[in-house]
Image (cartoon, helix red, strand yellow):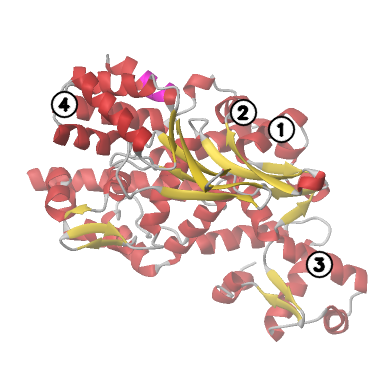
């Protein structure tokens, strides 16, 4: 009986711990999502964030409190202030995404929490990629085009702007807007030889097919 | 649901998640925070770790089980321990950071600052009363004081912490540790402990020799050089911040050490609750 009690207590404690980590994921929390996007871009244009996250950026009172609480600098570019809590928190969230990507961790936790998570605990890194892809596809102006560009970059592995223009038969302006959007969502990276898919997209290419 | 309400909900969810990861709410965080420790001691306080499946989860997070239980370097367990410390400071208005500002001919000057208005800004963002914003440090301090009171006696622990909080400044010149030793002697005289007991209480509440966390190297050729540390104690109340500054004297260079008390308000509140 005592053993049963200890096991119940463990399940409760583990569930509390795992659920807290899940709640921090950028796919589930608007605040960490906002901070994470800034982190992967180093800084983001103020106007872009004003459109994407109006409830944080538009109201001066909210914006100021948010900036002071988390350590965010709102200038023409929005960035995380070095050494402050927001920057630290997002580094930690990155570690949590890595942990939930680990199949060994997921299977061990899932076996203890099978009543609460009959399908197993989520892979938060994959979930975050899915959220970004869905966000991209619902982007009203360049969303559909950006998806097309992303599929082409995935197909060839690496592409320059001129190559995208030619293979997709689109103008230079459209190609730049689409790749900018893809960079903003952290779905592609740019190096001196062109654009390449992000590491997470290379790991879970099937998610792009599902969009 | 209005957009404004949605942001409030997300901020509240975030604070609750961080609070649920703190040791006052979770034994996994307690275990991670209290290591390294002997397997026997931990098994006695946390019989849960003897269940193999649970131990496997802890191993997957980077805990190592041998004669001693400890967190692997750069593991997730270590990251959680850091998160707990930073969140303690953040939600108790004690988060320290360093900022560089440009002062013309003096170049960039780095100074130590504190995020000391976090709770008020979180109250504004959530619409909650400031006292309803969780304070994991205060929760933990209450638990620690209660536990230590049950071991050493309430009177002793209360007088020890009160005397500690009454200190205005602790400084050392050239030799790190003298001012601190004077303080400890004073605390010992206040509570009337034997030297071994005093050492034990100091390690549990104030600091453990060799467990300082170096957080910043300050200064330049034009500004006083030195270092900043947080002193860690066994139960991580970590009330001391140490700052060293190099200064020039006739016979060469010397070093000043100044200790600042952290979390004063919360430690005081924790004592009041336990009184």
| Residue farthest along the left direction in this orientation | A1
Contact, mark 2 vs mark 4 (Cβ under 8 Å): no
- Tell me whether marks 1 and 3 sit on the same chain: yes
Q: Mark 3 points at which residue?
A: A178
Contact, mark 1 vs mark 2 (Cβ under 8 Å): yes
Residue A87: % across, % down = 59, 49
Any magenta on residue B268? yes
**In the image, residue B12 above or below residue A20:** above
Query: Residue B121's mark?
Result: 2
User: Of B132 and B36, which appears nearest the observer?
Assistant: B36
Residue at (62, 29) in percent of width and height: B125
**In the image, residue A176 above or below residue B136:** below
State which region is magenta.
B265-269
Label 4 CA crowd tier, 10 Å (few <14, some 14–19, many 20+)? some
Q: Quadrant of the C terminus of chain A?
A: bottom right
Please indicate, yes or no, whether residue A8 appears anywhere in the rendered image: yes
Q: Mark 1 points at which residue?
A: A64
Residue at (54, 55) in percent of width and height: A91
Label 2 CA crowd tier, 10 Å (few <14, some 14–19, many 20+)? many
Residue B197: % across, % down = 15, 33
Judged by depth in the image, the label closer to the viewer, 2 or 4, is: 4
Judged by depth in the image, the label closer to the viewer, 4 or 3, is: 4
Q: Give the distance between the C-alpha atoms of the residues marked 2 and 3, in whole angstroms.
A: 37 Å
Mark closer to the chain start, 2 or 4: 2
The main secondary structure of the magenta stretch is helix
Q: Mark 4 points at which residue?
A: B193
Contact, mark 1 vs mark 3 (Cβ under 8 Å): no
Q: Give the distance between the C-alpha atoms of the residues marked 1 and 2, in whole angstroms.
A: 8 Å
Residue B37: % across, % down = 21, 52
Label 1 CA crowd tier, 10 Å (few <14, some 14–19, many 20+)? some
Q: Give the distance between the C-alpha atoms of the residues marked 2 and 4, in whole angstroms.
A: 43 Å
Residue B130: % across, % down = 53, 21
């Amino acid at each position: 009986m005592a053993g049963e009690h200890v096991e119940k207590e463990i399940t409760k404690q583990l569930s509390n711990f795992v659920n807290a980590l899940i709640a921090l994921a950028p796919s589930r929390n608007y605040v960490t999502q906002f901070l994470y996007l800034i982190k992967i871009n180093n800084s983001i244009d103020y106007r872009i964030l004003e459109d994407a996250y109006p409830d944080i950026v538009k109201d001066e009172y909210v914006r100021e409190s948010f900036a002071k609480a988390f350590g965010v600098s709102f200038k023409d570019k929005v960035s995380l202030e070095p050494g402050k809590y927001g920057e630290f928190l997002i580094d930690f969230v990155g570690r949590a995404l890595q942990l939930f990507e680990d199949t060994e961790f997921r299977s061990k936790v899932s076996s203890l929490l099978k009543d609460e998570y009959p399908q197993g605990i989520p892979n938060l890194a994959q979930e975050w990629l899915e959220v970004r892809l869905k966000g991209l596809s619902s982007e009203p102006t360049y969303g559909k085009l950006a998806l097309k560009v992303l599929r082409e970059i995935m197909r060839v592995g690496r592409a320059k702007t001129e190559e995208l223009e030619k293979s997709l038969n689109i103008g230079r302006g459209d190609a730049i807007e689409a790749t900018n959007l893809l960079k903003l969502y952290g779905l592609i990276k740019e190096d001196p030889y062109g654009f390449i898919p992000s590491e997470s997209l290379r790991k879970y290419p099937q998610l792009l097919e599902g969009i | 649901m209005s957009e404004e309400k949605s942001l409030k909900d997300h901020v509240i969810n975030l604070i609750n998640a961080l609070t649920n990861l703190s040791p006052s709410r979770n034994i996994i965080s307690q275990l991670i925070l209290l290591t390294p420790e002997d397997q026997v001691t931990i098994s006695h306080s946390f019989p849960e770790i003897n269940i193999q499946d649970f131990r496997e989860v802890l191993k997957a997070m980077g805990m190592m089980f041998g004669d001693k239980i400890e967190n692997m370097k750069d593991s997730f367990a270590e990251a959680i321990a850091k998160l707990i410390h930073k969140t303690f400071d953040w939600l108790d208005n004690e988060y320290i950071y360093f900022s560089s500002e440009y002062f013309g001919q003096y170049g960039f000057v780095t100074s130590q600052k504190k995020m000391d208005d976090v709770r008020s800004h979180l109250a504004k963002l959530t619409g909650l009363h400031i006292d309803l914003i969780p304070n994991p440090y205060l929760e933990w301090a209450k638990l620690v004081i209660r536990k230590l009171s049950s071991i050493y006696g309430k009177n002793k622990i209360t007088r020890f912490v009160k005397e500690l909080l009454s200190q205005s400044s602790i400084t050392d010149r050239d030799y790190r540790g003298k001012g601190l030793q004077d303080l400890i002697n004073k605390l010992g005289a206040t509570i009337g402990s034997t030297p071994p007991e005093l050492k034990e209480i100091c390690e549990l509440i104030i600091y453990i020799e060799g467990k300082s966390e170096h957080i910043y190297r300050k200064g330049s050729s034009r500004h006083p050089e030195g270092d900043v540390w947080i002193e860690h104690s066994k139960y991580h109340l970590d009330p001391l911040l140490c700052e060293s500054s190099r200064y020039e004297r006739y016979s060469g260079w010397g070093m000043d050490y100044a200790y600042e008390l952290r979390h004063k308000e919360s430690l005081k509140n924790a004592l009041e609750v336990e009184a």
